[in-house]
Amino acid sequence: MPPGPRRAPAPDERQRDAERSRRLLLDAALHEFAAHGYAGTKVADIAARAGVNKQLISYYFGGKEGLYRALHERWQQREAEFAGPDKTLEEAVLGYLTAGLADPCPARLIAWSGLANDGSPDILADEDDEPRARHWKERGELADDVDTAAVLLAIRGMVMAPVVLPHLVRRLFGVEPDDPEFRWRYGELLAGIIRRLAQPMPAAAPDGTRPPAG
């Protein structure tokens, strides 16, 4: 028998297909950008990795830059789950560490954008960490005399270090960065540092030096 007319997909089927294609493209883009940087990543390679037509990148995201920004928006949604305003500073820092060790791609993508100067959109430009830092101070998790800008920079560096320097983790700890032993040892250190930040800084000596805290 000759084939009958092709059935048009129902609206819910089209929605599921669209969501699936977007998810596949975002997952593929994250790996490609993390491996090659913004300038070194080709939309054809993203589409090939996702197994979809590359024209869908323009259709769903408006092109390469839109896809890059969509990745950041997806990360912000995930970030709110483990570092939202209801989380303590210690919980947020350990959440960043756990997320980075579970999936190093977001941290590597940020490292590429900071070091390569490859024309990638500044996805951190619209972020405002100061309200979060003020919230930590109001709850007593940061001492009043602690430099919040320095703390925010230090936190980013501490949680990204195992991801961007995995060879040092192997050499210093003798395990892979995603090993539970490393997660526990390094996490304990970070938690201890965070707890110390709630203590006022020691008074400076006349020569400008400070005695050890604690």
Image (spheres, grey):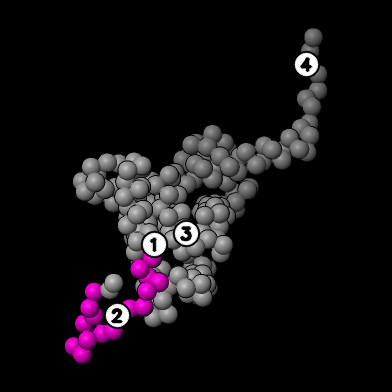
Which range of residues does the magenta coloring cover? Answer: 194-212
* Secondary structure found at label 3: helix
Dot 2 amino acid type: Pro
Dot 4 amino acid type: Pro
Q: Residues within 10 Å of mark 1 (few under 14, many from 20)?
A: some
Q: Is residue 13 above or below residue 98?
A: above
- Considering only order in the chain, which callout, 3 or 2, is on the residue closer to the N terminus? 3
- Taking the spot 48% from the left edge, 36% from the top edge, the residue there is 49
- Considering only order in the chain, which callout, 1 or 3, is on the residue closer to the N terminus? 3
Q: Is residue 21 magenta?
A: no
* Secondary structure found at label 2: loop
Point out the frontmost of discs 4 and 1.
1
What's the distance in space between the residues labelled 1 and 2, CA to CA?
Answer: 24 Å
Residues at marks 1 and 2 touching, judged by CB atoms closer than 8 Å: no
Q: Name the residue tied to disc 1.
A: 156
What's the distance in space between the residues labelled 2 and 3, CA to CA?
Answer: 26 Å
Q: Name the residue tied to disc 3.
A: 92
What kind of secondary structure does the magenta stretch mostly adopt?
loop
- Considering only order in the chain, which callout, 1 or 4, is on the residue closer to the N terminus? 4
What's the distance in space between the residues labelled 3 and 4, CA to CA?
Answer: 58 Å
Which mark is drawn over residue 3?
4
Residue 82 picture location, percent across and down: 52, 55
Residue 153 picture location, percent across and down: 38, 68
Q: Name the residue tied to disc 2.
A: 202
- Observer-nearest of 183 and 156: 183
Name the residue furthest front. 214
- Considering only order in the chain, which callout, 4 or 3, is on the residue closer to the N terminus? 4
Q: Is residue 205 magenta?
A: yes
Dot 3 amino acid type: Ala
- Going by the image, does 175 lie left or right of 155? left
